[in-house]
Amino acid sequence: MQEKLWNANFVKVNVANFMLFFAFYLLTPLLPLYLSETFNATKDVIGVVLSGYVVATLISRPFSGYLVDSFPRKKVLMVCFFAFFIFFAGYLAAGSLLLFAIVRTLHGAPFGSLTVSNSTVAIDVLHPSRRSEGIGYYGLSNNLAMATGPTVAVYLYNTVHDFDMLFWFALVVAAIGFAVDATVKLPSRPVVREKKKLSLDRFFLVAGWLLFIDMTALGFSYGILSTYLAIYGKEALGVTNGTGTYFLILAIGLILSRLQGASSLRKGKIVHNASVGMLISLVGYTIFVAVPNMWGYYGSALLIGLGNGHIWPAFQNMFINLATHDRRGTANSTLLVSWDVGIGIGVVVGGFVAEHIGYTAAFWTAVAINLVGVAHFFAVGRRHYYRNRIADEG
């Protein structure tokens, strides 16, 4: 008889994950407008202020993986979630651009730690026989938040025209997520206190370094797409209000592929899912720049969403299967860091290429790096995974 997938604890972790990402996406689309209207910040200043969040997130993740693996996971989860929740009150209290920049930057640290700890707890509450499938479903909560958060935020702001109300709403949503996670019961797991010196493998999953390269290449492409999509769409296609629709279609693709791919993950087809997802995503990026019309524009959104919806749970399963049970936090943080690094490099390189050659060249660069990542995975990454995996794929 098959073990239950949607046990009470797994449901709670998913609800909490939706709440934390919903609170995150409530602010993301409107913060540039808030900084411009409230503090008269220029575009370059807005970029600097908001980039601090990403930097803090990236720095915190390797250390959070170590903390999750070295201390009681429920306590680490609660501390991270409380810090994430309480920082929303800091936006209400920040009366100057400098204070807001400080709060925003510091807020990135608990967000980075929380995403690692919550996903690790989600793996802990799943039965091993349903873990691969469950990881695929877990990501649905992120995708649902991505699809609904920005829409609700824009509707709320257009209705009340009050940014403080938006901050209060995000604060309440995060508080609900914290309360839900507080009721999660984790299986007993002895915390191993290692007396040996700290090594790189406590902060970075060395066994996953080749997969790290692949995911970094994929993140590079997405970094260029997500950052310069609106400007390219306006200049090349005359699309002025299509960015929200683009990401909505992308989110729909993510959700559909996660639902469809769950059965394959249940059968242990992890590498198959990753391979299919990477090819679909590569086609999506290619169509985006090679077919400069509305069909190519919105069609690429669906394909990239479908591809990434297969890629993420497959790669997370692979990273987890390359790690022992006491390295799950490190495996999760390594996966997330690879994506962050790729996005960061993509934003910088894409901006440089766009400035000197043009946005079309920047997006062809995204396609080229994506192709390199796909080729590397098929030639090297897959074999490395099969040779070094610890857990069975099922």
Image (cartoon, helix red, strand yellow):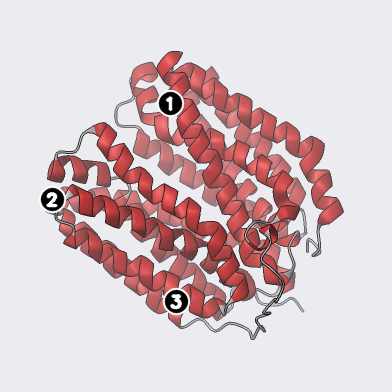
The residue singled out by tag 3 in the image is: 78
384 sits left or right of 229 in the view:
right
Q: Residues within 10 Å of mark 2 (few under 14, many from 20)?
A: few
Kind of residue at badge 3? Met
Kind of residue at badge 2? His
The residue singled out by tag 2 in the image is: 161
Quarter occupied by residue 171: bottom left
Q: Is residue 235 visible?
A: yes
| Badge number at residue 351 | 1
Give me the C-alpha separation between circle 2 and circle 3.
Answer: 33 Å
Kind of residue at badge 1? Gly
User: Residue 192, percent across and down?
Assistant: 68, 79
Quarter occupied by residue 32: top left
Q: Residue at x 67, y 41 (%)?
A: 213
For the residues labelled 3 and 1, say whether their Cβ atoms are less than 8 Å apart.
no
391 sits left or right of 40 in the view:
right
User: Residue 365, percent across and down?
Assistant: 56, 23
